[in-house]
Image: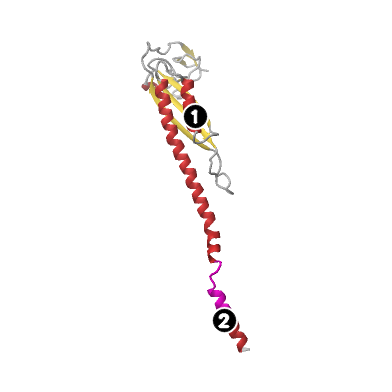
Amino acid sequence: MMLGIFRSGIRLRALREDRSGAALMEFGLVAPVFLFLLLALFDLGQWMYARSVLDGAVQTAARTSALESGDTVQADAHVSSMIKRITPDANVVASRVSYYDFADLDRAEKWNDEDNSGDCNDGEAFTDENGNGTWDADIGVSGNGGAGDVVIYTVEVTYEPSFAMPLLPHVGDTRKLTSTAIKKNQPFATQTGYTAEAGTCD
């Protein structure tokens, strides 16, 4: 009886002190966490690099578009080609809004705000400065404008990350980048001003 208890004690002690296989268990616990952090680092690195390249490409495209010989299609293609070197399946959308002067950025068309509502309504008169037939809370005109105009050039990029997190919902969703540059077109001709046509709001 005592001998059996003694032997059982030896076996339990030996089992408790046996470290074989511990490294494999520890690796099994640490490896998923390490892999997750590694993929997150790669994902962040791709995002930061793409952001840096996008900002540089947008500045270059905006500068070349401000010249008299500027080609907006070619400028947009340059931005797209630069970003697709990093994210080949990226969707690149460019837009331009032009203004007569920097003071006009984010300015509404002039109107008689009789009810002080901040909106042109109820037959209030307005000046159709951008000539599109309606009152606009932003006087900007879509496009690259003309000589001397101020242009806001914006590019939006959406892409699927190359290093999506496995087994985690929404973590591997699309990423979105936006970059904006504001440039004034060269005065290669006489600048066209706003119109003085009148209109009324419904």
Label 2 environment density (alpha carbons within 10 Å; few <14, some 14–19, many ≥20) = few
Q: Is residue 196 magenta?
A: no
Q: Is residue 106 above or below residue 166?
A: above
Magenta part of the protein: which range?
10-21
Image position, residue 110 (x, y; %):
42, 18
Q: For mark 1, what is the residue?
A: 81
| Residue 105, visible in the rendered structure | no
Q: Amino acid at mark 2?
A: Ile
| Residue 158, visible in the rendered structure | yes
Residue nearest the observer in this picture, 121 or 27: 27
Label 1 environment density (alpha carbons within 10 Å; few <14, some 14–19, many ≥20) = some
Image position, residue 129 (x, y; %):
44, 15
Q: Amino acid at mark 1?
A: Ser
SS for tag 1? helix
How far is mark 2 from mark 1, CA to CA?
71 Å
SS for tag 2? helix
Q: How many marks?
A: 2
Q: Main secondary structure of the magenta part?
A: helix
Image position, residue 171 (x, y; %):
55, 45
Q: Going 60% across and 83% down the picture, which residue do you hit? A: 7
Q: For mark 2, what is the residue?
A: 10
Q: Is residue 85 above or below residue 26?
A: above
